[in-house]
Image: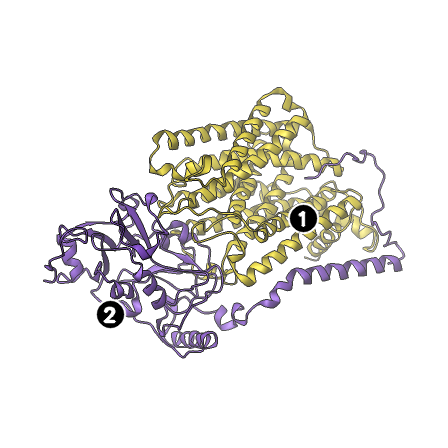
Amino acid sequence: MDVRDDRPSPGTPDLPRDPHGGEQSDGVSRRGFLTRGVAALAGMTSVAAALSPLRHLDRDDIPSIAEFFQKHYKEMTAEDKQEVFRRVQEAVKRHHGVDVELADPGPLAGVEFVYGLNLSRCIGCRKCVHACVKENNQSSAPEIEYIRVLEMEKGSIDVETANHHYPEKVVPDADKYYMPVQCHQCDNPPCVKVCPVEATWEEDDGITVIDYDWCIGCRYCEAACPYWARRFNFTEPAVAGPLNTDMAYLSNRPRPKGVVEKCTFCLHRTRVGRMPACLEVCPTGSRKFGNVLDPDSEVAYILRHKRVYVLKQDVGTLPRFFYYFDERGSRYHEPISEEVGS
Amino acid sequence: MKKYATFLYDCFRLSFVGDWRYQLWMTILTLFSLAGLYAYCQQFVHGLVTTGMTDQVSWGLYIANFTYLVGLAAAAAMLVIPVYIYRNLHLHDVVIFGELLAVSVIIMCLLFVMADLGRPDRFMHLFWRFNFPDSVLTWDVIALNGYLLLNLHICGYLVYCAYCGRRPSAVFYVPFVFVAIGWAITIHTVTAFLYVGLGGRPFWNSAIIAPRFLASAFAAGPAFIILTLQVVRRYSRHRVSDDALLALRRIVQVAMIINLFLLACEVFTEFYTDSAHVASARYLYFGLHGHDALVPWIWSAVGMNVVAALLLVLPASRGLRWLNAACVLSIVGIWIEKGMGLIVPAFVPTPLGEIVEYVPTLNEIVVCLGIWAFGLLLYTIFVRISVPVLAGEVTYENRLRKSGLGPIPGTTATS
């Protein structure tokens, strides 16, 4: 607020109403007309200057009518989906020059996926991180990675003592253990609860997905996630290397700028009977994935027999991602003897 | 209907008319607004990479300003309550300025939220799939827009009645005034719940945040109005009594003391317990592992609030000079504390223990300045219009008599 001292006394007689002395009762004088014209021109020029950065807009930054009225994934009919998927394919062709098939595998009946991570075995090599980036067409500039491997102090599960940026060339450090963290696909997901537009939801097989074409980019889900599992596209993502053309609408298709993305347990693979990319690449077999509703699955066996815990149980998120230890046979002790696999 | 259109046209004309100081002030605000628009266009083209925000600190200056301004808007209720509930008539004439402030400030809030969105072009999705009542953000959308409409209605109705030269009918605005009082408390509580409800952010996950929000809002808001009213009475012919200012002083006084008390409760709980939850608070007040970007800010804020509280309890602040000093200290102190001091530390360290500091970029700061300038521009126009209209100088009657082309009476008053 500006407060000046030259305040007019209460009885100040009427000051000239128009500083340019223009408008009189006999109409608009020439001088007034000119000054107004100049002022209007200056005004329009400065508005145009203020809007000038918009000339750099990419055509894909401006939604077409069809995109503007595109429905939420759950409301699309089969025909709607066909049209939307065709549009996505065209955009991929435009930007990456490749023809892709866009799959849309749904959750399988009687399947609930869980993921187990063996802390006794993980050596912190970050191969999972890099495989994930390739598989899911993540941006390299700015860098987006769904998996963060923490190098933990032995004797502590306090993440604040973790080193996020250890050099991976010299792993494993005998005095540390390694804890990879990615989306925990919670059964009580805070990210889903807070989303104002239902752009993210939990599917029947337990995977929390995002409709990248519905997200408004408010990042409330990022604030809500206790596992720091969500990533935001602060600018147009740039994928290094060739695109993975095996893609699905709700998982690894290229994302636009301004929306949130995250791990989907590689649903384009896992819903058609394959394993997640991070699991396939793991050299130590630390990663176990499967259907918890199947009592014969490896994950069901681990949950029954191993020492299992979930990260931040106190926040009540009921994760579908758990950590476990080997009673014996970890990389720190004698070689593992294979008993798993009933 | 024609009458209403004429009313709007007269308002539009009035907003361009004033002496050179008015013109200069408006030009400066317009230039700042346009600079903000330019910076926003940069952000729109390149994405939020133009800000200092990261995946680690995913909310920054925009949400900080938003939070502070919600409090400022809620503070309009602090003018209304004494008048309509306690019949303190000193404040009666100034209520409208509080409500006009609420209107402009809520518009600023909405602009800050829009600026923070990654996909503002998809704003319409809120209407098509509204995650109510699960998402607190949807509650906030309702609270803020409802409050905007309520205040627009009350102000618009009173000003339009004055323009038509008829007495406002109580039925058409008094019930809305009472709803608006309750609603003012709601907007700030719901905004606090946005943060409080997140279990993964221990710094926010505390029941004291909502009451502290209200206490600080009811200190900073009326402090802002005290300064505004002095500008209004200096540059327009509207009379504002010192009694009205002193009635507001009492509100700021009490609210600031409660605010400091709640701050002490919070600081004690965090630091005496000294559990893992203290990390964010330690980062804010003392720095964590050598990262201490916010430390000078928060101590300045605490210092300003304490000095303001001392000034406010001393008789010296019955004089305008010291009162104004206390008001400025409260406004700035609470802006730091409610803005950067509340939003940023919740993200440091991240839920995975990583420490990444947040520094706003120039582009981001210019967008913020632009929104502030635009809000002040709106408020200046609102005051500019309502002062002569409420004084009965610009009315439909006058206009008819002067056959439209003549100068608008009452336009000599500058705001």
Side of A145 relative to B17 (left or right): left
Does B154 sit left or right of A286 as displayed?
Answer: right
> Residue A83: which disc?
none
Q: Nearer the viewer, mark 1 or mark 2?
A: 2
Q: Is residue B123 above or below residue A80?
A: above
- In the rendered structure, the residue with mark 2 lies on which chain? A
Q: Which chain did the renderer colour purple?
A: A
Chain hosting mark 1: B
Hue used for the chain lettered B: yellow
Q: Is residue B114 visible?
A: yes
Q: In this orientation, does residue A29 appear?
A: no
Q: In the displayed structure, does residue A295 sit left or right of residue B234? A: left
* Residue denoted by label 1: B377
Check the picture and name the quadrant holding the N terminus of chain B: bottom right
Percent position (x, y) of residue A100? 38, 77
> Label 1 amino acid?
Leu
Q: Are marks 1 and 2 on the same chain?
A: no
> Foreground residue, A332 or B92?
A332
- Residue B110: x and y in percent read 55, 51
The quarter holding residue B192 reads top left
Of residues A149 and A74, the one drawn nearer to the viewer in this rendering:
A149
Q: Secondary structure at mark 2?
A: loop
Q: Could you tell me which residue is drawn at 38 percent across and 46 percent down?
A: B198
Q: Which residue in the protein does label 2 denote? A: A274
